[in-house]
Amino acid sequence: MFTAMLGWFANQQLARNLARSTVEGRENTVKAFAAYVNAFPWQWTPAMVDEWLGDLRSLRDLKRSTIRSYSEAVRSFCHFATDPLYEWASTCEERFGSHPVQVVHEWNTAVHVQDNEADAKKRAFTKAELHAFFAHCDDEVARIRAFGRKGWLPAFRDATLFKTAYAFGTRRNETRMLDAADFGRNPHGAEYGEFGLCRVRFGKAKKGSPPKRRSVLTVWDWTPDILDEWFTDVRPLFGAEGNPAERGLRIGCQRLNSRFIAYRQALGMDEGLDFHSFRRSYVTHLIEDGWDPRFVQEQVGHDHASTTPASARTSALARCRRHLDGTVAAALESQNRRQS
């Protein structure tokens, strides 16, 4: 019975157009909860949820967002199992003398109260750190190549991916899914040539929606050189002619993470830096350089300004500084006029 319920639950989630990875994740979470409490859905109680989530926090030290996603998976399953339209409650009552109930409520799960609940440890690169990281990427390519090993090609590819992620403020999956055809000219930025913009086709999707698309304009003058060298000199060495990806298969997220961590550790940088730090750095550095916050928001594909908190704070400080500089300049000018 439980297996049948899970199968129908998965079908319902797929019918809502949720990603298969989301559906499989929820299904696995429900299975894990059932195994933990050693009980079937028609035997579950809110107290079981309390104990399960409490152990996840205390023993596994999971992130708040992860705990919330687990509780949401069980809540969604219970909502499905108790819906009279599917008749699971009446069937269980008839067969087992009990029926499923909703065991996940507001009073026994975490409430989402902040716009941004990212791990406070995670941060952007400083410009000096970023320069050191990219220099290390290039040094590794040269070192491996000097030994006559083919490993310099993957190292070059990964270095280009890291630089591209920063150049366009893209997420990890957005970066690895880029194709040669995704780069094009910007008529208002002719100086960037064939790499004036980047068309992101696999942006972060909303629930039940396809990947979100956006076009990101090139802003750094070094970006075309990086991409031109890759597409002209290095990518053909992979034997990828006629294939939009580097090889038959795209590089995996875990492979990117492994390379990033190895470089970070070699440089002695802290764990607050991860692949997403390229995107954080892109936002932070643009704002620090005086770019308009609204433009930055559009570049990274945020629907709401609150999703880009660094821009709000930094731009406010920049405006205060401009007003202060203007006030000081006006006072000095007035003093000079009086003295003259």
Image: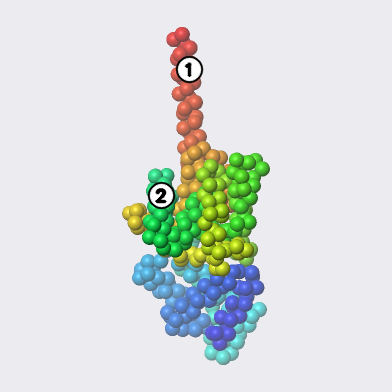
Q: Residues within 10 Å of mark 2 (few under 14, many from 20)?
A: few
Residue type at the position of mark 1: Glu
Q: Residues within 10 Å of mark 1 (few under 14, many from 20)?
A: few
Front-most of residues 263 and 322: 263
Residue 112 screen position, x and y as percent: 50, 60
Q: Which residue is mark 2?
A: 135
Please, what is the three-letter code of the amino acid marked with disc 2?
Answer: Ala
Residue 85 in the image: state x and y as whole percent: 66, 78
Residue for point 55% across, 43% down: 219
Numbered mark located on residue 29 in the image:
none
- Give the residue displayed 47% in from the left and 80% down from the top: 34
Q: Is residue 337 left or right of residue 212?
A: left
Q: Residue 331 in the image: x percent, y percent?
A: 46, 19
Label 1 sits on a secondary structure element that is helix
The numbered dot on residue 333 is 1
Residue 272 in percent (x, y) is at: 39, 55
Quadrant occupied by the N terminus: bottom right
CA separation in Å, label 2 and label 1? 45 Å
Residue at figure coordinates x 49%, y 54% from the top left: 160
**Which residue appears farthest toward the top when viewing the image?**
340
Q: Please, is residue 36 above or below residue 314 in the view?
A: below
Extreme residue in the left direction: 268
The quadrant where residue 239 appears: bottom right
Give the camera-side residue of 225 and 339: 225
Q: Nearer the viewer, residue 296 or 176?
A: 176
